[in-house]
Image (spheres, helix red, strand yellow):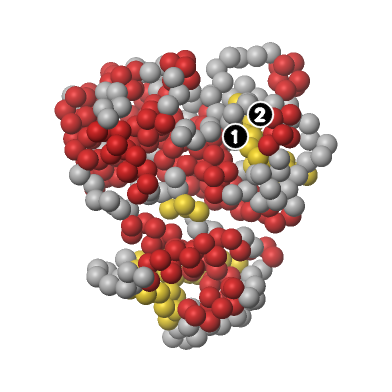
Amino acid sequence: MIRRTCVILLLLVPAIALAQTKPATSSLRTYETRYYTIYTDLGRDGAREAEVRMTRMADEYRQRTRDFSGELRGKLPFYLFRNEADYHAAGGTPNTAGEYDPNAGRLMTFAGGEQANLATWYTVQHEGFHQFADQVIGRGMPIAVNEGLAEYFGEALFTGDSFVAGVIPPWRLKRVRASFEGKKFMSLRELLSLSHKEWNKALSQDNYDQVWMLVQYMVHGDDGAYRDSFAAFIRDISTGRPWDAEWQPRFGDIDAFETKWRSYWTNLPDDPTADLYVETTLRTLTSFLARATARRQRFDSLEAFASATEKGELKSSESDWLPASLINDAFKRAATFQTTGASFAIVSDAPRPPRIVYTPKQGSQMVGRFTLKGSRVEGVTVER
């Protein structure tokens, strides 16, 4: 099934048309954040989750694209509707779960309830990158690169204080392998040569998978060997230079590169980024532990921490709030890891702040640490 995302609009329309298609905001509350102006009819917790996620999301875009993007000037408009019908009434394209319209400059989606689910946030992270790229990178990227980066950010996992990017979901890898066996992927040369019109004319899950696979490989494949060249490649083609003229100096013959790319994907283990899922879990648990510590709440064990979470007794500052669903999901993932013989433990040795240590049955430990600035969390890190 193709994830319902938008067809990027290409036609330029007069300013009067933009005014006519701007969503009515009379029933929406407005929230000003660091990077976005959020318009939503969700309740306070739903709106607060959007505020936190969107700020961290833009931070992730900026950090990951700093070598080839410019500065974000002005706040970006984001419309988050409770109901799908209201999203469509406001101009949302039929059969989409969200979209970025570059002509109006707006990002739109719907939650399908009082709080958005993970599928909605996947769409926001994907479409939000198109909005960000339009503002700070430019429209010169080939559609394959633009969509590939959007898919890459769509898969990133939110931890409360950051995102963990570069994950390869096992279910998606399984689908990729089936597509390889079915010879459903086009050549990389054909993929990169697609125009926006050609992409939109034949939307397919295989195309979305393939552009994601290309970006994933460019950023993380072969121990990051292509990361710097990929950043330079994007920087140059974003100015309108032909992609094929910029490819050869950085990556060599594209057919030879494709052979390496295919070999990489076909030889991956079944769960190649299991460590990133552990890191996501550890970062999330540590983010909540940090907030509780800031409110002078102490735990002697992870079990006590989990019990307070289950009872709704976990403390945090109103100004540093995170959605409870985030830590509930983290504890579920932690329980899954523990079935493999791994363990999570809170270690306290005053006067140092408490930390969470992950110990696998085999392999190296990971340690989740945090720093506070007054009553707010200043940073969360995971050491390996």
Q: Determine which residue is flagged by label 2.
A: 92
Based on the displayed image, in which of its 4 quarters is residue 226 positioned?
A: top left
Q: Amino acid at mark 1?
A: Gly
Based on the displayed image, in which of its 4 quarters is residue 358 positioned?
A: bottom left
Q: Earlier in the sequence, mark 2 or mark 1?
A: 2
Label 1 SS: strand
Q: Nearer the viewer, residue 264 or 271?
A: 271
Q: Which mark is residue 233?
A: none
Residue 82 visible, this angle = yes
Q: Residue at x 34, y 18 (%)?
A: 193
Callout 2–callout 1 Cβ contact below 8 Å:
yes
Q: Nearer the viewer, residue 255 or 318?
A: 255
Q: Amino acid at mark 2?
A: Gly
Instruction: Return the x and y of residue 367 as percentages of the image width and height.
Output: 38, 70
Q: Residue at x 61, y 43 (%)?
A: 35
Instruction: Return the x and y of residue 348 as percentages of the image width and height.
Output: 45, 83
**Label 2 Cα neighbours within 10 Å, binned few <14 / some 14-19 / many ≥20:** many
Label 2 SS: loop
Q: Nearer the viewer, residue 16 or 266?
A: 266
In three-dimensional space, the C-alpha distance between marks 2 and 1, rounded to whole angstroms, equals 7 Å
Residue 64 vs 308, above or below: the answer is above
Q: Is residue 242 left or right of residue 202?
A: left
Residue 288 vs 152, above or below: the answer is below
Q: Residue at x 26, y 23 (%)?
A: 187
Residue 235 visible, this angle = no
Q: Residue at x 59, y 29 (%)?
A: 95
Q: Is residue 358 left or right of residue 85?
A: left
Residue 269 vs 321, above or below: the answer is above
Q: Count the labels in the image.
A: 2
Instruction: Return the x and y of residue 96 as percentages of the image width and height.
Output: 58, 31
**Label 1 Cα neighbours within 10 Å, binned few <14 / some 14-19 / many ≥20:** many
Q: Which mark is residue 98?
A: 1
